[in-house]
Amino acid sequence: MIVDDTLFGNIEQCQAGTLLGWVASKRHAEPITVRVMANGKLIGRGIANLYREDLKAAGINEGKHAFKIPLEELRALGEDIHLSLVEEHSLTPVEHPSFSISYHGPLLQGRIEQVDGSSITVTVKSNHNLTEQTAILLVDGLPVVSKTFNDEDDSCCSFSMEIPAKYIDGRPHTIQLSIDGYSDCLASCAEVLRPLSYPWSTALKNIPASSSHFKEARYTTLVDRLLNTSNGTNSLEVDALTQACELLKKYQPQVKLEFLSSYFRNDASIAVVVPFLGDMESFCHTMASIAVAFNESPFKLVVLAREELVGVLKGGLPSNSEILVNDQGLNELDISFLVDSIDVEFIALVQPGFEVEGRWLDRLVAPLSKAPLLSITFGKTIDHSGALLNLVDTNFDEIKTNPFSPEVNYQQHIAPTSELFVLRTASLKETHSPSHLSLYVPGSTAYCYFSETEKLHINGLEDVYSLPPKRNKVLFIDSQVPSLGRDAGSYAAIQEMKLVQGLGFDVTFCPENLKNIDGNTEFLQSQGIEVLYAPYYQSVYDVVTKRGHEFSAVYITRYGVAEKWIELIRSFIPHAKILFNNADLHFLRELRQALALNDPKAMEASLDTRERELEVCKKVDAVLCYNTTEQAVITSHTLETGKLYTTPWVLESQGLGFPLERRQGLVFLGSAAHAPNIDALNFLHDKVMPLLRAERPDIRLYVYGSGMEGLSSKYNSENIVIKGFVPSLDDVFHQHRVFVCPLSFGAGIKGKVLDAMTYGVPCVLSDIAAEGTGLEQGVNTLIAHSEKEWAEAIIKLYEDEELWNSLSNNSKKLAASKYSFEHGLSAFKQIFQSLNIKSTD
């Protein structure tokens, strides 16, 4: 590698979390790729290839040497931060003037409240009264407008800023809020900036809903309906769906709703109630939306109307619908009247003028079917302007209006609203129990199509439910949102959050990268876990400073995450206990790998990891390890045992797969991104499978795991088949005879081995693979060392049915006794009690 020692440049400013400057070489005009170092740590990288006219005018080649590099969280590095640049590959320092960032001033926080045409309303808060400051608004990373504000009598200030007309182009843009002289981004959002000459709220009255935020929701609902329509659909069903869609687009006076009758069943255990309050347009719109929205749950239709309005409806309703006369007052109803009048298990109510999304009913009924202590579930309702309707978030003592805000997008026990709900009728028919709960289910959504819609007022909802006592909270921090079904670490993270919930705590999860990952985020939210993400939070620092006071404990996974935030947590949440889950003992894994490969540089790196990892262990209140081997190693260095605990691993019971005679082949499971897995696969490919090919050519090895499919050209052979990622472990363990795992280095407990145990697939393992699992040679597994031992053990287990059944049964028994949810709950209870962390005050 040729080292260019003539690199020079300048760091000009750090604004909204982005570093600006330039780098060039005195020898050539090629762009330079650089790393940004802060106090010796890598916090960003990028290429200096942006054109700037001033650079060209200064004679710096053709001027294509500027950079704009997003930085990782700076606050975690302390109050005084020195930035430097080095070349990416050779690590040659770039000659540039010194540049430092100081955080000795007041703590500032910001929020973008509203984007209304070209007007942006923002709020800035401080831990002190606000002296004169200059707010800067950036669009697509470029500062476009500034405003000086001053409120010496208050620590909070709200004001508006106007975006220049050239950005109001109907296209999506990123908007960021920063303060002059302040390096961090205080708030950000992504918005389509539409050219409007009057406020957005006024424009909405003249824009049909199908052209605004309803459009995507309606399209998704219709696609779901079409995908779940039987192949043998007759012309009448197609006509009914077409008419319903037309009715959603535009009201047709004197419309007859008989065409909707095929969507309702009088013998169903669920009744959907739609009030008719006199406005036929809003009533028909809701009826059509109920028909278009697909649900697997069958339901009957009940129309609620006052006596004087029944005549208006006659002849226009589906023949299999039922009219229930409400004589209780003008647009008011006691909930007990519905329960007494309709003999079903569940009653769902949809207010007129609301348009429901697909599967709204399934999502509201599902929790009631599973949890007998639930009495009512209710969904998210959004008004004509796109704001959340009437959801009082009791956890935050304020009304949240943004329907995408993390605080209102997870299942939680809060007071129900009356626009969209499902009630278990038995909860009113029986003596009211204070344990009957209300559950908010944000996955079920209804939109208020009309700007002004009269609603039925429901009396007595407060008698249906009770709210649980306020629970203390635990904040979980990890590098990213757990990926359901992708890796053992993600599985463990999810189970540990469920265990903490099982102890009576509310759980909030903060991914360090703040990414909202489709599917994975929604899964956690459906489990009652609040997930924090951008743009509502800018960083872990933002989360800790804004929300830290809410948490009784912080549970951090991985030392590389923990080392950044311990000091911040101690500073802003001094009362919170810090629990550190090491996932695996990284330096032990690296040390074993260095020894296995005889790599001196890797050995040196493992020692550096050891110092960092042990430093984290010393600073936290509890260290959680998955096996006692790691505990012993940590103790040998820190000379303390009081804060060391064994992290329970929870296995869910699995059904039986194929009988032995229908199973074939060996199975190996592991991510291609994890070095120990590739080393194990190399051992199988180079050493073991050739021996088996000579003795038992019919035995094949099937390799599963994310990323493995990309290695098929290297490993596929006569007796090795690369399968890659599969969404369900049933596909891995139900059809194969023997699980093999010849790990020669690694640390922690091996989730794939535990999975094999709970599926009852007998294993042949290395010592390291069996470490910490409780498996014993000859009792519930076979342990092998040399390639010859591996081949012999595999053939023996493959051919001996009695041995196979014995190891299978014994491993399932071990999984049931040592890895049950109840066992894990007991272990976590002991940990939290020893730290005096209580679920309620």
Image (cartoon, grey):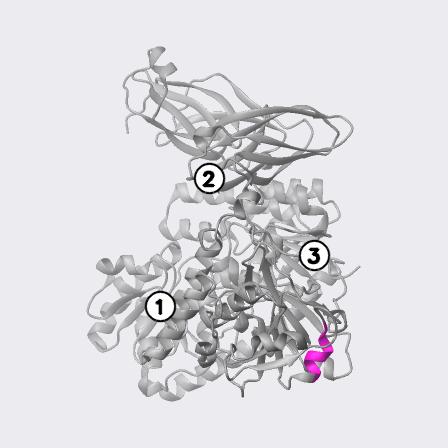
Residue 361 figure quarter: bottom right
Residue 100 locus on image (x, y percent): 56, 23
Q: Residue at x 53, y 25 (%)?
A: 145
Q: Label 3 is placed on what type of residue? A: Val
Look at mark 2 in the image and give the residue it sits on. Answer: 194
Res 229 seen here: no
Residue carrying label 1: 668
Q: Amino acid at mark 1?
A: Phe
- Span highlighted in magenta in the image: 333-340
The reply to whether the C-beta atoms of the residues labelled 2 and 3 are less than 8 Å apart is: no
Disc nearer the start of the sequence (1/3)? 3
Label whose residue precedes the other's in the sequence (2 or 3): 2
Residue 33 position (above or below residue 334): above
The residue located at (22%, 78%) in the rendering is 698
Mark pair 1, 3: CA separation: 50 Å
Q: What residue is drawn where x is 65% and y is 40%?
A: 568
Of circles 2 and 3, the one toward us is: 2
Residue 210: say if magenta.
Answer: no
Residue 693 can be seen, yes or no:
yes
